[in-house]
Image (spheres, helix red, strand yellow):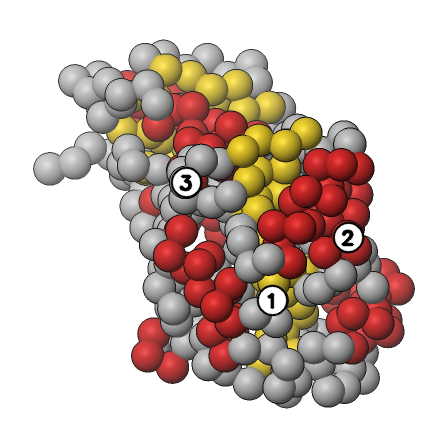
Amino acid sequence: MRTIRLSANGEASIEHAAGIIRCGGLVAFPTETVYGLGANALDGTAAKKIFMAKDRPVWDPLIVHVHSREMLESVVPSLPARFDDLFSAFMPGPLTLVIRKSAAVPDVVTAGRETVAVRFPAHSVAQRLIAASNVPIAAPSANRFGCVSPTTADHVLADLDGRIEAVLDGGQCDIGVESTVLDLTATKPLILRHGAVTREQLQRVLGDVDVPDPGTLSPPQTGLLSPGMMPRHYAPRTKLLLSSWCESALASAVEERLEKKVGALVPTGWNISAAAKFDWGRWGDLVTLASRLYAGLRWLDEQKLDVIIAPLPGEEELGGAIRERLLKASGGAMCPPLGGRRG
């Protein structure tokens, strides 16, 4: 199969991509978070192709993307009581809701569960593609399973060239980390994955919001409740280690590994002596750090390093999403504290 690259600027390209979706094919497309790999969400055979292209296990469910409330109501029997509050505050945008599904959604999309993850993407290309396709589009991130998510069309092609029909090139994604996933079927709203809609923002709309124990996962044979719940995910091929949040801790972590070829995600202005450094942005500018996270991990992964080291931000606001991605990408592997050495 030859993967064609379509410019997202022209309506002819959007219609071409929509035709592929309607015929049961796969198209990668930009959203405000990361690039998604889309198929007709109501066509189980088409959805199965996503799993094959990504080497994705069938127990990891997909997110269904819609462009209107009417389209959403075609895949769910009813809307939760707090839906209107969330719709007014965050939609379209980087918020995914887990709610009860209708029989129209194939089991392959939901990993056999009676719930479906749905969202309204804010990116104009995603909205135009869904509207032109005239079907809800199931779309996980457009990368090989477990690897670093793509924020450009080049990233998509690096992983999936020859495995999918087309990629709509809409430039770089703005947010750079996946959507927040909020379970509305629980007794209390439950954040299953952190993202650009933060816990603090959700609390201002909903009141109390829960976060599950990080070690709590559904057994794969029953299907995960949401994408992004694996303990190791979003990972580069190169080993990733994490340091604590300050410049001195990152510098120490790099210097203690001088016998290795070390790369680092380096906040702007930090004096770090790594063999390969990616300018991550100003520390504390969480919007920039999120938008450059995956690009940085991918670039460092190409430098033939022994190890990559990144400082770990705090949990507040968008830092929670960045922190979650880094912890999963590293498998939770932390450098020793400042001044500590491995025995």
Q: Amino acid at mark 2?
A: Ala
Position of 185 with respect to 225 (left or right) is right
Task: Look at the numbered discs 2 and 1 and tell me whether their residues touch, using CB distance below 8 Å.
Answer: no
Residue 78, quarter of the rendered image: bottom right
- Quote the CA–CA distance across marks 3 and 1: 22 Å
In front of the other: 339 or 7: 7
Residue at the spot of label 3: 1
In front of the other: 209 or 93: 93
Residue at the spot of label 2: 132
Dot 3: within a 10 Å radius of its alpha carbon, few (fewer than 14), some, or many (20 or more) residues? few
Ranked by sequence position, the earlier of labels 3 and 1 is 3
Residue 59, quarter of the rendered image: bottom left
Q: Residue 15 location in percent, x, y? A: 73, 44
Q: Residue 100 location in percent, x, y? A: 64, 84
Position of 310 with respect to 341 (left or right) is right
Specify the label residue 179 is tagged with: none
Q: Residue 215 location in percent, x, y? A: 38, 68
- Quote the CA–CA distance across marks 2 and 1: 14 Å
Task: Look at the numbered discs 3 and 1 and tell me whether their residues touch, using CB distance below 8 Å.
Answer: no
